Image (spheres, rainbow, N blue to C red):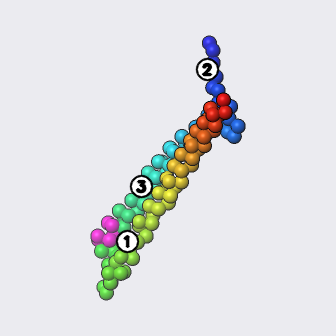
Amino acid sequence: MEDKKSNFYGTYFNKDTVLKIARWSGILAWVLLIVLSFFALNSFLQFLFQYSTGIFFQKGMSVFDLIGYFTPYPQQFAPGIVYFFGLKFVENTLLILLDIEESARRASK
């Protein structure tokens, strides 16, 4: 049996390693987004149940006090979104750099 040899002679990196890192970066991005969103949603739902039972209500509360209760919960989604876009950026950047090097090799022939 003949092994099919790739004509890719990477100067800067190994093609298989870059593809593995890019793939795992994409998978990790989705996993972190789902897990962190689950925790943030769970926390928000617990707050809504507590709020609906009247735990957070006090006499003399203004509208601004009421709005202040809800402001931390959208911020809990922020780390998941930042990690997701950061890891997706890494994945796509690695694939673009791999394509640039392959194109440079083909053009030099």
- Quick check: 63 above or below 26? below
Any part of residue 106 in sight: yes
Any part of residue 21 in sight: no
Tell me the residue that label 2 is attached to: 4
Q: Is 74 on the left-hand or right-hand side of 88?
A: left
Residue at point 34%, 78% (across, down): 66
Q: Amino acid at mark 1?
A: Phe
In the rendered structure, which disc, 1 or 2, sits on the residue that comes first in sequence?
2
Circle 3 packing at 10 Å, graded few (<14), some (14-19), many (20+), is: some
CA separation, marks 2 and 3? 45 Å
In the rendered structure, which disc, 3 or 1, sits on the residue that comes first in sequence?
3
- Quick one: quadrant of the N terminus? top right
Q: Is residue 13 magenta?
A: no
Residue at point 36%, 80% (across, down): 65
Front in this rendered view, residue 44 or 99: 99
CA separation, marks 1 and 2? 60 Å
Circle 2 packing at 10 Å, graded few (<14), some (14-19), many (20+), is: few
Where are the magenta residues, as a range?
48-53
Q: Amino acid at mark 3?
A: Phe
Front in this rendered view, residue 95 or 44: 95
- Circle 1/circle 2 CB separation < 8 Å: no
Image x and y of residue 99, in percent: 58, 39
Front in this rendered view, residue 77 or 19: 19
Tell me the residue that label 1 is attached to: 70
Tell me the residue that label 3 is attached to: 38
Q: Amino acid at mark 2?
A: Lys
Q: Is residue 52 magenta?
A: yes
Image x and y of residue 88, in percent: 51, 49
Q: Is 41 on the left-hand or right-hand side of 3?
A: left
